[in-house]
Image: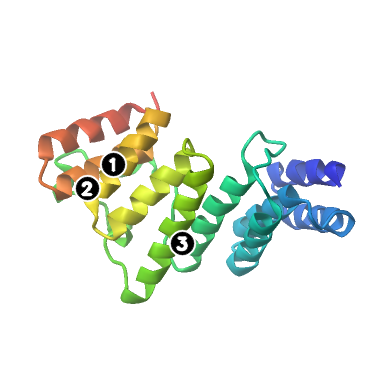
């Protein structure tokens, strides 16, 4: 089963997702309690935008897993919680994706927010329960591994959507203690500071974000 897991990850890295899933399914037939395989299958299904199936896999991972470390060196259960959060979000149109450098505004960002990021501002009532579920998943990941960068940054992004900017900034600050070159956290910390009219601090964060890829 472990060999099939390794093979599945190799196929995943090569972008052969359908073959990847088949390899994981074979591993599950041999060892259905193998949490790392369920988690890896879920990540591939997420890539294939099969979010409901992905969430089922992450739930199976959480059911079967203690605090085991996977072959990639990460805590499998924490990974499953944060992956479930991402699948929930994307299934309902709430996406956590890296921010391309091209969106950084040249003038005061408060007057030049790019249209593609209006989605961060417009959340329907139907999405609110999902946002709270995403936060709960992030919190579960943090309980297991308090240094889980994407758990803190995704929680912060979700709080931005809920317009809870003070708490969002706290999450980004923790994320930046883990990785002080995390562009997304700098950018959205700056955005939240701007929403709180702390413009000078916001501009500093935006400036740092622009330099993160240098």
Cα gap from disc 1 to disc 2, whole angstroms: 7 Å
Give the image location of residue 77, x and y in percent. Answer: 61, 48
Q: Along the horizontal axis of the image, is 30 left or right of 129?
A: right
Q: In front: mark 3 or mark 2?
A: 2
Looking at the image, the residue that sits furthest to the right is: 30
The front one of 10 and 34 is 34
Which residue does the numbered mark 3 point to in the structure image?
A: 89
Q: Along the horizontal axis of the image, is 196 left or right of 187?
A: left
**Residue name at image x 31 percent, y 36 percent:** 173
Q: Along the polypeptide, which appears first: circle 3 or circle 2?
A: 3
Give the image location of residue 183, x and y in percent. Answer: 37, 35
Q: In front: mark 1 or mark 3?
A: 1
Looking at the image, the residue that sits furthest to the bottom is: 126
Residue 117 visible: no
Answer whether labels 1 and 2 touch (C-beta < 8 Å): yes
- Kindly identify which numbered label has been placed on residue 90: none
Cα gap from disc 1 to disc 3, whole angstroms: 21 Å
Q: Say which element carries label 3.
A: helix
The front one of 129 and 51 is 129
Q: Is residue 4 above or below residue 33?
A: above
Which residue does the numbered mark 1 point to in the structure image?
A: 170
Give the image location of residue 147, x and y in percent. Answer: 47, 35
């Amino acid at each position: 089963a472990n060999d099939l897991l390794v093979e599945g990850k190799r196929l995943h890295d090569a972008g052969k997702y359908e073959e990847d899933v088949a390899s994981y399914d074979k591993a599950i037939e041999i060892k259905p309690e193998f949490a790392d395989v369920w988690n890896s299958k879920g990540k591939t299904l997420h890539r294939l935008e099969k979010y409901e199936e992905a969430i089922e896999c992450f739930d199976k991972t959480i059911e079967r897993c203690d605090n085991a470390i996977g072959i990639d060196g990460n805590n499998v259960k924490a990974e499953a919680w944060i992956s479930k959060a991402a699948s929930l979000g994307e299934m309902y149109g709430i996406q956590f994706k890296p921010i391309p450098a091209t969106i950084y505004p040249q003038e005061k960002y408060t007057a030049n927010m790019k249209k593609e990021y209006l989605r961060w501002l417009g959340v329907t009532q139907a999405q609110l329960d999902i946002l709270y579920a995403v936060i709960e998943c992030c919190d579960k990941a943090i309980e297991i591994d308090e240094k889980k960068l994407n758990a803190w940054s995704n929680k912060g992004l979700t709080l931005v959507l809920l317009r809870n900017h003070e708490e969002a900034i706290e999450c980004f600050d923790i994320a930046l203690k883990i990785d002080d070159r995390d562009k997304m956290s700098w950018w959205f910390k700056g955005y939240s500071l701007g929403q709180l009219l702390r413009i000078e601090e916001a501009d500093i964060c935006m400036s740092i974000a622009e330099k993160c890829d240098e």
